[in-house]
Image (spheres, rainbow, N blue to C red):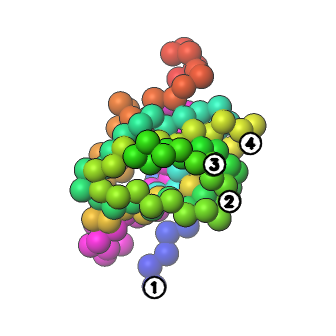
Amino acid sequence: MLVRRLAEAPIEEWHKLRSHVLMDAGELGSRNMSVTWLEIPAGAQQTLHSDGEAEQVYVVVRGAGAMSVAGDTQRVGEGDLILVPPATDHSIDNDGEDAMACISVQSPPVAVAELYSEQMAEVSGYEDEDL
């Protein structure tokens, strides 16, 4: 059995967003998916972006916020699953006072460097010197 523990997963940070790479594209023998644990601090927002050909699922594991998919914005919270079809603009906004965490699964797999480029991981509410 192949196991990658959250505490042992490589971490990628862009501004105030933190992504734990649970399984990057092609890792652990997986051919059809990649998995990340995304932490969004209070007041932070992942800007609107699209992941090309990958179908994506977010599962909120902690906190609450707003998720926008194809122009439809809804409140989401712990236990909610959000499906993002391929090539569909989407974003997450943690407009609450507590940290938010989501698991994100992409198929076909998307390398984390491609998924969270600096361009889309801009964070609102912070000055450049805070980044």
Judging from the image, what secondary structure is the residue with disc 4 in? Answer: loop
Give the Cα separation between the discs numbered 2 and 3. Answer: 11 Å
Q: Badge 3: how crowded within 10 Å, few (<14), some, or many (20+)?
A: few
Q: Amino acid at mark 1?
A: Met
Which circle's residue, 1 or 3, is located before the other in the chain?
Answer: 1
Q: In this rendering, is residue 73 above or below 7?
A: above
Q: Residue furthest bottom?
A: 1
Which circle's residue, 2 or 4, is located before the other in the chain?
Answer: 2
Q: Which residue is mark 2?
A: 78
Tell me where the magenta segment starts and ends, as one range: 11-35
Give the Cα separation between the discs numbered 1 and 4. Answer: 34 Å
Q: Which residue is mark 3?
A: 75
Q: Residue furthest right?
A: 97
Judging from the image, what secondary structure is the residue with disc 1 in? Answer: loop
- Looking at the rendered image, the disc whose residue lies closer to the viewer, 2 or 3, is 3
Q: Badge 1: how crowded within 10 Å, few (<14), some, or many (20+)?
A: few
Question: For residue 1, which numbered disc appears in the image?
Answer: 1
